[in-house]
Each structure stands twice: as structure tokens, then as C-alpha cells.
Image (cartoon, helix red, strand yellow):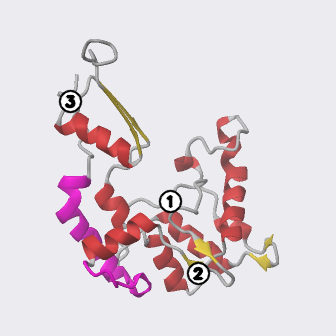
Amino acid sequence: QKFYGRAARYSYFVGSSTGGRQGLTEAQRFPEDYDGIIARCPAVNWQHLIANSLWPHLVMLEAKNVLAKAKFDAVTAAVVAACDGADGVMDGVIDDPMQCTWDPKAFVGTKVGDETFTATDADVVRKIWDGPRGRDGKSLWYGLTRGASFSGLAATEGNPPVGKPFGAGLDRFRFLLAQNPAWDWTTLTRDELELFVQQSVEMYGAVAGSDDPDLTRFR
């Protein structure tokens, strides 16, 4: 107002990831705040997403088999190569991952640097893609999409490789779910994961979910 001599006529919100979630929260709960909202790659369903962010590492813990980044990168390249052309365009992107049924067991025996991709590696990848499951096999949430990078939720480092969980997810496990700053993620079990998911939905769904599809008030 000081620069232009008048107040702004329109107000817009732009955000990505957490900012995108904040944008959707504005549209859902406070529709009069902004004239327009650009919510890019919004991290919605936060109560589910965060509570399941340790699933890839739980899979590797159960299998006693931590995959090196090179193996994750190689199997990602393989699935993209297998499913990329399904849409008629070879552009390095799987257009519809739900239609991609490539099984990582097809990659077993492939050399990755000085290592060989094993059947146990394939089982780990398949379970990560399949998504988190509780003790009785009940699906708890969606898995990582075929073709997406493993580096966010299934990051590993070192030689031999060790798990490196997603920092924001690990913090929420420690401070919001376990409520213990010293909580050791390597002790996680399926029983605990299922309980943490339920706790997350009950305690934080209404606060951080931002997943109400009804935007009729935002006009």
C-alpha cells in the first residue's frame, strides 16, 4: 500500500509440499482468506503418510537385508524401462503407474556394480511397492509408486548400507507418536506400526489431514 498508494485488490497463496497442504487447509477451512490458491504437490493425508514413512525400513529390518542406493536406483531404472512405453511415448516417465505390473523378480541375477540383485532384494522392493501392512496382512496405506525414487522414504547410506529414515517422519514418530526423543526406530515391529497409524489418525487426522474433498465454500 505504501509503494502503490492503495491496498492490494487480490490476495493469493502459493505453496508446495507442506505449503501445498497449508493452501488446501486454507481452501477447506478458511475459504475467505484468499482470492486464489496454488497448492503444488500438497502433502495431504499427513496422518497416514508420516505414520507409514518407516515402512520401507521396517521391510528391510524384517528381511535383515538393507539395499544399497545403487540397487534401488538400478531397479527403478529397470521398472521405468519396462513400463515407460506403455503410453506410446518414451520419455523416462511411467504415465500410469497403476497399469505397470513389472515384477522385480525379473531383475534377479542382474549385476549392480560389484553386487548381484538377489531374490531377497526383489522381495524387499515388492513389499515397499505393495505398501505398509499390519500383523494380519491388512493394508495400512499406499506403497511407493513404481518408478518413483526410493531416496526419500527408503534412503540408505554407507558400506555395508544402513537405513537412513526420512527425517521429518522420524521426528514425528519420536515426538508425536512414541513421545520419546530417544525412541529407536530399529526396534519397530508391525504391531507397533499398526498402533502408531491408528494413533496418528486419531490424534492428528483432523489437524493435519487437510484431505476434505469438499471445496464448495471456496469460490
Q: Which residue is mark 1?
A: 144
Name the mark nearer the viewer: 3 or 2.
3
Helix, strand or loop status at disc 2: strand
Q: Residues within 10 Å of mark 2 (few under 14, many from 20)?
A: some
**Percent x, y for residue 184?**
39, 85
C-alpha span from label 1 to label 2:
20 Å
Confirm whether residue 119 shows in the render: yes
The x, y position of residue 72, in whole percent, is 65, 67
Q: Which residue is mark 2?
A: 162
Q: In the image, what residue occupies the spot 46% across and 61% down?
A: 143
If the image is split into quadrants, where does the C terminus sit?
top left
- Pointer 3: what residue? 33
Would you say the residues marked 3 and 2 are in contact, meaning their CB atoms lie under 8 Å apart? no
Label 3 CA crowd tier, 10 Å (few <14, some 14–19, many 20+): some
Mark 1 or 2: in front is 2
Q: Please state the total of marks drawn on the protein image.
A: 3
Crowding at mark 1 (Cα within 10 Å: few <14, some 14-19, many 20+): many
Q: Is residue 185 magenta?
A: yes
Q: CA separation, marks 3 and 2?
A: 46 Å
Q: Which residue is found at the position 78% from the left and 75% from the top?
A: 109
Marks 3/1: CA distance? Answer: 34 Å
Amino acid type, callout 1: Leu
In the displayed structure image, the side of residue 140 where residue 64 appears, left or right? right
In primary-sequence order, the first of circles 3 and 2 is 3
Residue occupying image coordinates x 59% and y 73%? 156
Q: Kindly give the residue lying farthest to the top in the view shown.
A: 5
Residue in view at x 36 percent, y 44 percent: 19
Q: Nearer the viewer, residue 79 or 205?
A: 205
In the displayed structure image, the side of residue 219 where residue 67 appears, left or right: right
Indicate the secondary structure of the residue bearing disc 3: loop
Q: Is residue 46 left or right of residue 127?
A: left
Dot placed on the residue nearer the N-terminal end, 3 or 1: 3
